[in-house]
Image (cartoon, helix red, strand yellow):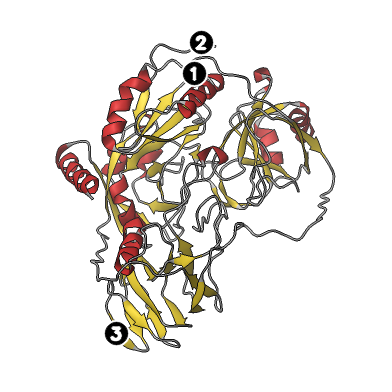
Amino acid sequence: MTVPVSVPVHRVGTRALLVDLPDLATVMAWHAALDSTPLPGQTAVGAAARTVLVQFRSASTTDAARGVLAELLPGDTQPVASRDVTVDVVYDGADLATLADTMSMSCAALVDWHTTTTWTAAFSGFAPGFTYCVPEDAGRALDIPRHPSPRPAVPDRSVALAGDFSAVYPRTSPGGWQLIGSTTQPFWDASTEPPALLTPGDRVHYRAVTERIEVTTAAPKTTTGGRRPTCRPVLRVDDPGLQVLIEDTGRHGFGDLGVTGSGAADRGSAQAANDALGNGRDAAVLENIGGLTLTALVETVIVVTGAVAPVTVDGHTRDRGVPLLLRAGAELRVGSATEGLRSYVGVRGGVVAASVLGSSSADLLSGLGPAPLEPGDTVHAGPARGSVRPVAAPVRTDGVLRVVPGPRDDWFTEGVEALTGSAWTVSPTSNRVGLRLTGENPVLRDRSSAGELPSEGMIAGSVQVPPNGEPVVFLRDHAVTGGYPVIATVIPEDLDAAAQLAPGAPVRFIDCTTGSGARTAARTAARTAEE
């Protein structure tokens, strides 16, 4: 394997770098080297088709690492132990016939190519258990186009193709790959070790079958897994509004399994709630959209932060950010937001729920963590520790998001100006995975680079642009990898503000590497470092 003396290194926001490499073998060598010997301040490293994404603790360590990465020369690595895994497929995919026609093949010929090719599991991404497989013989690879715009929901266990990859969607999720079939085999089970069916290096053989036969030998397992710590029932959910989730600071360090960080969408508001109640900042809270009604089962103390919304206890108006004592039987109501989108209800002692991979956060993309709360559900809390105090509960909803250009702004004819020079509106299809934007200006459809972008690492704040030219700002439940170019990245300090933008809200992007945007970003980063 030949490793270049110097490689292109791109900024991804203020706390990550993306390294361009010539082939997958080189990517694996770099990943192994950075995983075994991390750089100073490095917090995560992830492999993709032709890139390695390295994340850091701060902007200063990111800047210091940029030159080091450009000259890094990983040594030879030991070959990865492999298994042979057979996947039974019913070739009934919605895109099979159209894709075969696009590739100038018959459906039978496309299926024959897929089943007679030996595939190698290369890396995980997009979602837990979603493993990118490449032909063992590179000469058998086909260049499969993605859909111009991703489907909102791809059925679980769909067998799909894109670029030179084959993969199986482990659960229902958005996706832009070509669907050629389906399987009954589970590719992710959080209650097993390892939780993913495939690991890098496995040899995968797809086998055509004519019917789905799924044998269940045990009781179905929930997605939560884990055991709930000692706790007490404190609240009953009477009306969850549009959505109530349990969220903490998220699960980190599992990107190689395709698991994103998740956690509270507006992290600042969640931490403020815990600060007010004397909880640790990593304690779980309730994240709500659309208002909710709760009844206290025992005497407890709560606080409401996040979106500006009316708060009442037994019909009496109460303030946000102020700890409230609820007597047993008292009714707490948080109304629909008048400013912002997401409200947070903190409970003294912290909300307690079963954890998966060290977190109780609900991840809507992967399905990990507790399910959304429903009427009649009970909320549990842990033991109280610190003292309570009022906190400031501001929410920024001006729609101004600061970005760092790249890593793929050169894919667009007008560069990052195509993003910053246009007015955008939040789409009703937005969720915790991403803020979907619409706009009348089609300028982001004009690309200077043709063809498909090999899947590469994503972070919260990545502004991904599909061919339809309507950007998506990834939020906390984003995919670990993606195949559409990222024109810019929202800085970490503005992610909370992005999470509070409601459907219909206007959005404007500012390049924070130039002019007043750079000065404002520097001041914000300095304040964050002090805190």
214 sits to left or right of 355: right
Q: Residues within 10 Å of mark 1 (few under 14, many from 20)?
A: some
Residue 441 in the image, given as x and y percentages of width and height: 33, 46
Three-letter code, disc 2? Thr
State which tag comes first along the sequence, 1 or 2.
Answer: 2
Of labels 3 and 1, the one closer to you: 3
Residue 454 percent across, percent down from the top left: 51, 30
Frontmost residue, 45 versus 100: 45
Pointer 1: what residue? 22
Disc 3: CA contacts within 10 A as few (<14), some (14-19) or many (>=20): few
Position of 190 relative to 21 (above/below): below
Q: Is residue 423 visible?
A: no
What residue is disc 3 on? 317
CA distance for labels 3 and 1: 62 Å
Query: Quarter of the image holding residue 324?
Result: bottom left
Mark with earlier residue (2, 3): 2
At mark 3, the secondary structure is strand
